[in-house]
Image: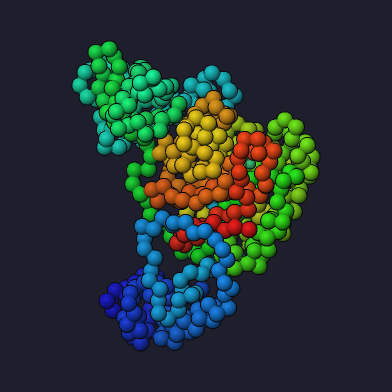
Amino acid sequence: MRDRILVFLSERGTLADPEAVDFLLEQQDPLAMADLLLQSFRDPPLVITLEDILHAGMIARAAAERAPPAPAMETARSPPPRPAPPPPPVAPAAFRGSGTCAADVSEDIKILKDITGRSTCEGTIDDFSRYFRHRFQTLSRLLRSRPELAGALDVYKAKRLTRETRIIGIVKDVRTTKNGHRILELEDETDSVSVLVPSDSGLGADTIVDDEVVGVGGFCNDRGLFIAKSINHPDIPVSKAFPRTAERVRVAFMSDVHVGSRTFLADRWAKFRAWACNGDEVGRSLRYLVLSGDVVDGIGVYPRQDEELVLDDIYVQYEAFAAMLGELPDHLKVILLPGNHDAVRPAEPQPALPSAIQKLFDSNVLFVGNPCTLSLHGVRILAYHGRSLDDFVSSLPGMTYAKPLEAMREMLRKRHLAPMYGGKTPIAPEAEDHLIIDAVPDIFVTGHVHAAAIGEHRGVILANSSTWQSQTSYQKMHNIEPMPARLPVVDLHTGEAILKAF
Ligand SMILES: [Fe+2]
Ligand SMILES: [Fe+2]
């Protein structure tokens, strides 16, 4: 064990004197202890001494005594394939949890996928067929890589065989017969076929929607009907581990602020601002704020909206929001994508807000499109405003606005943010389908439905980022109860997700 500790430390650019190593060896888990010890140094010394270890312990104890009581918050799972180290005997508080002061950590943002500046579509028939071809080819490639669908045949060939085969296609229609069977019209680039999903096949609970790409195992009967015995979605094949960052900083997710509306909750925002500026350990470690759309209420988004506005000029709404962001700490980097209330084309993927609006904001706001995939210190985040949640809720029994994570799990299973074309989500037929979830994110966040939730799907952290608006008359009419002023926060070092209430 002594050698393992020395190797562990030397791989991280430091050494320890014999007394320090003896001390580590006496601990229950010497390597975990060494790891925690290293994290407590901003700049680890060349040789760690016993004095360094004891000093770190004293700092930790002092910090623990100074720390205010923990605020009320809900804690969700973190995807925990990597178990948290046991609490060390010397320095529990600072070692265990605390985030670094975010102001001390350099910014590390990479935009991995964003339509901004890359839109080419004109909405022609050719655009549409190219768009769907790209969707089919990308997702069928993903499905074909799965063992269950190895050797999948073209629909044209499978229709001419009576033995068991596998096919991959895009669902052009799905309907339920009066006997409870489902019929899918499945199409690939060679042909189309009607697929019968028998009600007693055990596939009854499987969620299938129009325009998603699925793999089906089964056989063709003598009437040309393909009888399904199995259905595969692209999904995330194996549960993934969270990529723990070296930096101990956190990211918060917010959306649907709806500045300009009468129902904007200024008092709850003030509480958030106070916490972000002078709050607890979580607040101090907050380095990034991802804003997933509907930051203002907009103008003319729905009939008679003007009756519900206190600011009826779109520029004044954005100016007010820019001023609100300007009151947050300078080191809090804001990443802002649009939603359906924002001043940009409604068809998805939406580009970033126009420069006339961007220039109203400070330079610490980064404007991106919707959806956007970005990396923060190597943690991959998929942020999507979430308009398609409307389509999931209206077309699938059991889906509700109050439980958006169910629909988000379906998006990951289908590897598509808005599979249903022609519903409430306007989609621009770009040359590539930007709504495909090609790379698996570590964190997937949506807004739009004014709910608040955290959870996970196969190791991906899920969050729906609440709202800062109370119930609107539209929501009252439709019996939608919002869950305002909640803030999902994820620790990029541990993957722990919490939902903080204001
Ligand atoms: Fe909204
Ligand atoms: Fe929205």
Residue toward you, 121 or 427: 427
The N terminus: image quadrant? bottom left
105 over 364 or under it: above or below: below
Residue toward you, 51 or 192: 192
Where residue 326 sits in the image (x, y, percent)? 72, 57
Where residue 296 sits in the image (x, y, percent)? 70, 44
Q: Is residue 230 left or right of residue 293?
A: left
Residue 480 visible, this orientation:
yes
Q: Is residue 203 left or right of residue 437?
A: left
329 over 485 or under it: above or below: below
Query: Seen from this angle, which residue lies furthest left?
Result: 163
Where residue 33 sits in the image (x, y, percent)? 38, 75
Could you say which quadrant of the image residue 327 lies in?
bottom right
The C terminus: image quadrant? bottom right
Residue 120 visible, this orientation:
no
Name the residue rendered at 57%, 36% in the picture.
387
Q: Is residue 50 left or right of residue 348?
A: left
Residue toward you, 87 or 106: 87
Where residue 140 sits in the image (x, y, percent)? 37, 31
270 over 457 or under it: above or below: below
Residue toward you, 189 or 502: 502
Q: Specify how the rendered protein is coloured.
A: rainbow
Name the residue rendered at 37%, 36% in the picture.
234
Q: How many marks?
A: 0
Name the residue rendered at 31%, 25% in the picture.
198
484 over 211 or under it: above or below: below
- The quadrant where ligand 1 appears is top right
Query: Seen from this angle, which residue lies furthest top?
Result: 223
Could you say which quadrant of the image residue 356 lies in?
top right
Name the residue rendered at 64%, 38% in the picture.
475
